[in-house]
Every structure is written in C-alpha cells, then in structure tokens.
Amino acid sequence: MADIFGTLYGGFASPKETKGEARLDAFIKKFGGIFFPFLLCLTLMSAGLYIFTENVIDIFTIIAAAEAAGCFALFGRLRKLKHGGVVYFAMLVAVMIIFNFLIMLSGPREFVEWFFSGGQSVDTRPVFLIAFIWFFGFFFCSVIYYFTQVIYRSAAVVLISLIPPALSVKVTVALPSYFPFILAGINLILFIYYSRQAFIGKSRSGKSSAALVVYTDFAAAAVLLALILPKPTETPYYERFEYYMSFFQIGGERETQMNGSYSRYSGNADDMLNGESRLLYYINTSSPVYMKTQVFNDYDSENNRWDSGDENLNGSKKWQDAAQLLNFQKLGSAFEKVNSYDGEFYEEYPAAELFSGITEAESFSLVYPRDYPAIYVLAPLRSTLASVSNTGARFTARTDSGEIFTNLAYLPPNAEYTIRYYTENILDELISRGACDISEEDFGDMLNYAETELYFSDSESEEYKTVSAFLEEYENAVNYRQDHHTEVSPEITELSQTLTAGLEYDYQKAEAIEQYFYNNGFIYSLAYRPPEGMDTAEYFIFESRTGTCSDFATAFTLLARAAGLSVRYAEGFVPDAGEEPVENSYFIYTENAHAYPEVYISGAGWKIYEPTVPDLTGGAGDSDENNADDALTAIFTAIIAVIAGGIFILLIILRPKIAEGIFRIRLKFADNSAAVKLLYNRHARILGEKTETDTSSMTAEEVAGMTFEKTNIPLEPLTGSFTEVCYGGREISDENLQTAYDCYKKQRKELFRKNKKRKDR
C-alpha cells in the first residue's frame, strides 16, 4: 500500500521497481481518476445492500456494479454534450418515476417499513432491493462523479461515504468492520491522487491542512452519529404509513378467520397493531369515543403483562337500570333535594352544589361489524344500553369493570347493534367547575349522607336510586383498588411521589402523571424491542422511553396505583374518520386497537386518560398533521424535493445562458454608447474568467491583443467603437453597434469553446 501511495504522489517507489509495480503505476496514472471513484460507489452500494441482505457479494451486488459502470460511462458522454445538463435532469426525472413505480408495485408501506427497519419488520423482497439499487446507485454515482471528475471536493465525497454507516446505526444492523476501513482508505487514496493532480495543475484540490480537517470531521461525525441517533435493538420505523394502507382494505371471506375474543393476558392491542391492516367495524355516531373490549386487573411484573383474573366473565344482566342512573344531571337534582331537607348539606359539602345546573343527554353509536365475529360488545366508558336484538343474542351482561358481552359464544360476523352512552365531555366540565376538588373520603361521605337523607324521605324515589347508583360505583372503585393491589418497584414509587408531590385531588395527580409522558421525550413505536431481559416497565420509564400503547398504559397504571389512585388497564379501539371524512361516519381498523388507563376520579367517576405519545386519537397533534406522514405523502415529498433539487442544479448549469439573456435584455434598453460600453466590459470580464487574468487594469489594445491570442479573431470592431465613445466622445450608429455586437458574440462563443477543450484535455 505504501508503494501505491508513493506512486500516486509522483513515483517515489523503490528504484528497483518490479514490472508488476510498473504496470500498477501505469494503470493508476491512466485509470486512477475514474477507477477509485467507481470503486467507492461500488463499496457504498455493497455496504447499503449488506444492511438488508447481510451478503457482501451476491446477484444484487453485481447489478449495482453494472449500474455504477453504466452511470459513469453515461456521465462521461454527457460531459461532452452541449446540453448535457438538460439530459441529466431528464434522466433524474425518469429515475424518480421508475423508482416510484417500483415502490407502488411493492407497496409504499411495506417498502418504508423494510427500509427504516433494516429488513427486520418486513421480509426482504427482490423488488425492494431493485428499487434501492436503482435510486441510491444513481444518487451515489451522480454525486461522486461530479465531485471527482468535474470538480474535486474531498468534504463532499467524505460526507457521501458516511451514508451507509449512518443508515447502519439508524436501523441497528452492524456493518462488518472492514467496510468503514475500506471507505476511509478509498477516500484517502482519492485525496492523495487529486493532491498530485493539483500539484501538476490539473485539478482544484484542497491542501494537506484541509485534508486533516476533513478526516477529523469524518471521525467526529462518526462518533456523533453513534451518540445522537437512536439505538434500539430493533429500530422504530414510520408506523403512520399503516393508516394509508388501511384505505385499501376490502372485506372478504379470508378475513373471517380473524375474531374478537377475550384473553387471559394483555397484549391484544399490540398484536393487532403489528398485524395485517383490516377493517373491523363501521361506526355511525355523532362523535367517536374510546370503545372498550376488556379490562386486565393484575400486573405480572415478571412478564411485564396484565392478567384478567377469572377466565370466565361474570356480569349483571340488569346493568342498564343502574347505568342509566349514573347521570350527573340527576345527581345534581338529588343533591338539591337533599339540601332542601337539610339546609346545611351544601355548607358541609360545597362540592355538592356545583352539580346543580348540569345538563346531560344520551348519545348513541350504530355498530356495523365487517366480517368480524366477536365475543364482546364494544363498550364506551359510560354505556347505558346495548341493543343487540338483531344479533340473535338473548341478553347482554356487564362486568363491574364495564365489559359488555352476550350469551353467545361469538356474535355473528356482520351482526349490527346499537350502543347508548353518556359522553365523557361532562367529566371535564365537572373538573373545571371544581366539583372534583374533593378527597376520596369526603366524596364517599357526601354520597352516604345524601343516600341516608333520601332513604328516610322516599326510598323509592329516582333521586335515592341515583345517589345509590353513584355510591355503589364509588364503593366498587375503592374495593377494586384494595382487591387488586399492585406491588410497585421502589423506583416507580419514588417517581410517582415526585410527580404528585403537593397535589391534593385525584384528577390533579392523574393529569400530572399523564403529562410526564408528553414532557420527557417518550416515543411511540411498534417496531421497538427492548434488549433481551429488559422488557420491564422500569426500563421503559427510565431508559428506553420508547414503546407501544401497552407500555404507556402499563407505566401510567403503575404510577397511578403507586399514587393511591383507583386505576385499571383497559384495551379496546379508538375509531377514526378515515382518509376522506364523512359526517357521523367512523371506522375501526386493526391499527385503531389501543390500550389505555381508566382512573376513578372523586366527583366524576371513571375517566379515561391518554399517556400514549403520539395519541392515536390525534391528541398529541392535529390529525391532519398525522395524516401528512403517510407513505404516499412521504414518497411524493421526496420526489418533489429531488425534482426541486434537480431544477436548482439545472439553473446552476444554465446560469451562464440565463445571465447572458439578462445581459442582452439590458442592451435593448440602453442607448448605443452605453450599449458599446456594456459589450466591452462584459467581454473583458469573460476573458479574465477564462484566462484567469485580471483585465480590469488593461487597456483596450491589451485586451484586444490577448483576445486575438486566444481566439484568432480580431476584437477591433468592438474596441474601435468603445475607444470612440470613451475617448472621442462620438455617437455610435446603429450599424456600428450591430457590428460591435456581432464581434462580441463571436468572441464569446470561441472563448467558451476553447475553454471547454482545455478542460476536456
């Protein structure tokens, strides 16, 4: 290698140079300027392909080599064409169109998941690799060819060389150690080669000090990339592309293989999110709400999952009567009646008076399953009625946790039913009124006091039954917390105490825990997997801060239980409006599966909180913004960016013609004398640029003499008129101006032609 470097520096090899070394020296002198850039392109493509195939050499590497050889040969021809830049731009557009076709052929979502997961999330397909080679091969060849064959810029070449290592870090697929060494070695050879060319005056290259800076930047950039870029065991990728592909799902016989069932352990939401996109339900409703399917009660810290407890569900068949009584408007009326019996009730319990004036009405959702048999009935949090008469079911039952099911093993796959419920909006109104500024103990005392007063006055009244229903819900919540006590680790307990320190009421504590996830850099990712043995809530909260909705819901539930709140882990769905929203129409796809916590808030009852970031309902950002992240938008954005870059490059290439056009427009609006001055000054500037000479201090005769040496065309038709204007004070006729202009055009054309020939040599 030392001999190669010596040869590149100008033949400092041993005097006893062998024939092989001589041949190598001759080869490098003749082909080094194109061979090493080609070798760099091939190495970059090989490294990129290795990330997805883990093969150093295979058929795709050969295809990449053929593409690189073709690109370099083609670019060499384009340099000799008069309008080579325009042809290149047309090629760039063609490359993007074909690349887009390959992506659409393979599936935008699948390609993006494959690319950003290093082939971990989607099996590698030949069309993926062909698309990769087609686009990145052309990109690498274009950039490296320009910055080595047209004008050498070591910094640009080094930065391009960083792309495969950066991609490797991004997708956590380790490149063999020899790839970085080969890339660095080729960059060093290129620098030495072009340093020699600069020494003999054939290229513009940096100095040795510049090279030191470039390679220092190379090392620093590699370290920074390793430190800054995320390093999960399996990389996150763009889950938002799932939504785009769900638009194309169509019901069919094959989809009936999927059904909704209860399970012993949590994780159904994650399984659905990681599976094939399927349309499960069509919902007709005024506004979407969280729809629960199952609650899991006990946390299994060893396996980081939740246990539903009893495998056989038990529930009340007469749940509707009690559910309809859980109406805050009725509760306000009941409190007013209690206060009329005992005028000190509001004084003793000021929160009770804040329920006065509340208005509440039922909402409903029509549910249309799409070839999806399910054990459960979708259940909004404050469900009051499930009408399943058209499904063949005899009854519905509801558990204390709010799960609704029927007597059937599975509802028919297309059975339609109606759900009535009170909305959750009123819970926020109660909090804003201050009705929830009450401790759990005081809220229980208030309900007990009111029930006792109403019992003695009229135990058959609706007011008594309403207060009794709220008291029963309260007691069930307290008992739930006691029956499902969770041993929380000291680390989580300490964090919970820190987050809720100084907070008095339940809703304040729940909100503080919820905001913790939004304000501390947590990331939602389906593809992420923690290191082996580290799949724990503690690792999620304190280390990775990256996970699925199940991880967020689990973390919130544990923190809330450590804070003394009654909280349960639930799984269900969050309907969305689809790509083209229609009033009152919503959809539930598999990607709308969700896990979330429900907290009992004194004064408001059970309330849903959303710790998952980003919120699948759009709470963490406008839904339109989320939709903008879909695969098709990302692809077309990339295409537009490339085309815009191509236009920018084209403008740079055509800059001389554009500048000349502007100059000629100026001539049209100048008088004859001013026009002659413009022509002479512009010619002198062009001559100076092409000969690298300062012509500003030269006389007209000197400029004419230098011009004739370069073009063999006399400049007197232009300098003669210029001299008459500047020194004779004469007016120039239209005929003389035209003669001067014709002379300028001939000189300009010949100067550019001579300069191009010199560069080609």
Image (tube, grey):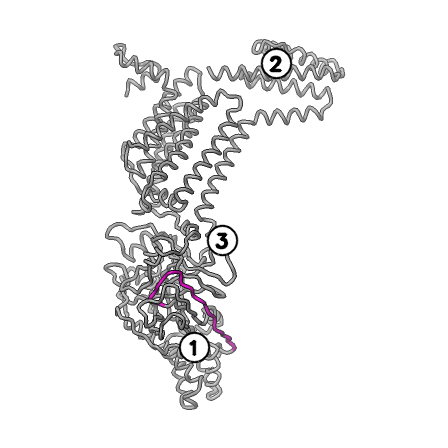
The spot of residue 249 in percent (x, y) is 41, 53
Tag 2: amino acid: Met
The spot of residue 334 in percent (x, y) is 46, 83
Judging by the rendered image, the residue that carries numbered circle 1 is 324
Q: Residues within 10 Å of mark 3 (few under 14, many from 20)?
A: few
The spot of residue 238 in percent (x, y) is 39, 48
Which label is found at residue 698?
Answer: 2
**Residue 358 in magenta?**
yes
- The quadrant in which residue 386 appears is bottom left
Nearer-N-terminus badge (3/1): 1
Give the SS element for disc 1.
helix
> Residue at left 33%, top 50%?
527
Q: Can see residue 505?
A: no
Nearer-N-terminus badge (2/1): 1
Is residue 365 found left or right of 50 in the rendered image?
right
Give the SS element for disc 2.
loop
Task: Count how many numbered circles sit on residues in the image.
Answer: 3
Q: Can see residue 95?
A: yes
Q: CA distance from mark 2 to mark 1?
A: 99 Å
Judging by the rendered image, the residue that carries numbered circle 3 is 624
Q: Which residues are magenta?
A: 357-376
